[in-house]
Image (cartoon, grey):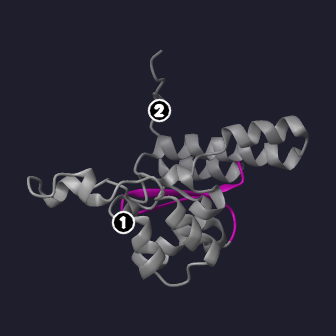
Amino acid sequence: MTKQTCATQYTLAQAKAACRAMGLTITKRDGEYRVAYQGNVTETEPSAYYTNDVNDAVATARAMAIHQQLLKCGCDNCNRIARENQRKIKPHASFGYIRPDEVAECWENISSELYRALWESMSGEKPLSQQIDMENSSPCDAIGISTLASLWAKFTPEQQVQLNELALTNYGR
């Protein structure tokens, strides 16, 4: 099966109108589109979606609007569909270079629950020295080894949101 693509490229004005009609907002800054639910930026940031493709932004807005409608219904079937279709929370870009133990020990404002989850995510992981040949490799070979991003699925969605918020505090977007 081939991926279908939209033949029409949205203009920013068209994208804004489409998002507004669905109860979402879209903004463009430095070539990047941000799609989010309407409301205060600090409240909507954990669920915001960033992309450099306007069609991707509008498609994601549609998925977010459908998800929101399913949650509003509240019946068991809609709740089940909403959970199955919920957009996965992507890790902050910095998590491709940071190990969970670094976050647990070096970052401020880590709750005791999150601290425990960060350390538990590494259980069963080999020490870095056993994951790569330290003598015959470059520092670049270590990228992606037991990083927070590589262990992302071990965290609950709530923990993922907390981690992304902390990353925004420490590193920005």
How far apart are the alpha carbons under marks 2 and 1? Answer: 39 Å
The image quarter in which residue 165 lies: bottom right
Q: Hey, what amino acid is under mark 2?
A: Thr
Residue 62 vs residue 75: left or right? left
Badge 2 marks a residue whose secondary structure is loop
Badge 1 marks a residue whose secondary structure is loop
Residue 52 vs residue 138: left or right? right
Which label is found at residue 98? Answer: 1
Q: Nearer the viewer, residue 86 or 67?
A: 86
Taking the spot 62% from the left edge, 77% from the top edge, the residue there is 112
Which label is found at residue 26? Answer: none
Q: Is residue 31 above or below residue 162?
A: above
Whether residue 10 can be seen here: no
Residue under label 2, please give it. 8
Give the prevailing secondary structure in the magenta stretch.
strand
- The picture places residue 42, in percent across and down from the top left corner, at 61, 74
Taking the spot 63% from the left edge, 56% from the top edge, the residue there is 156
Who comes first in sequence, dot 2 or dot 1? 2
- Residue extending farthest bottom: 108
Q: Are marks 2 and 1 in contact (CB under 8 Å)?
A: no
- The picture places residue 31, in percent across and down from the top left corner, at 37, 58
Taking the spot 56% from the left edge, 79% from the top edge, the residue there is 110
Residue 161 vs residue 128: left or right? right
Magenta residues (range): 22-39
- The picture places residue 30, in percent across and down from the top left corner, at 36, 64
Q: Nearer the viewer, residue 148 or 34?
A: 148
Q: Nearer the viewer, residue 81 or 73?
A: 81
Q: Name the mark nearer the viewer: 2 or 1.
A: 1
Q: Hey, what amino acid is under mark 1?
A: Ile
The image quarter in which residue 129 lies: bottom left
Label 1 neighbour load within 10 Å: few <14, some 14-19, many 20+: some
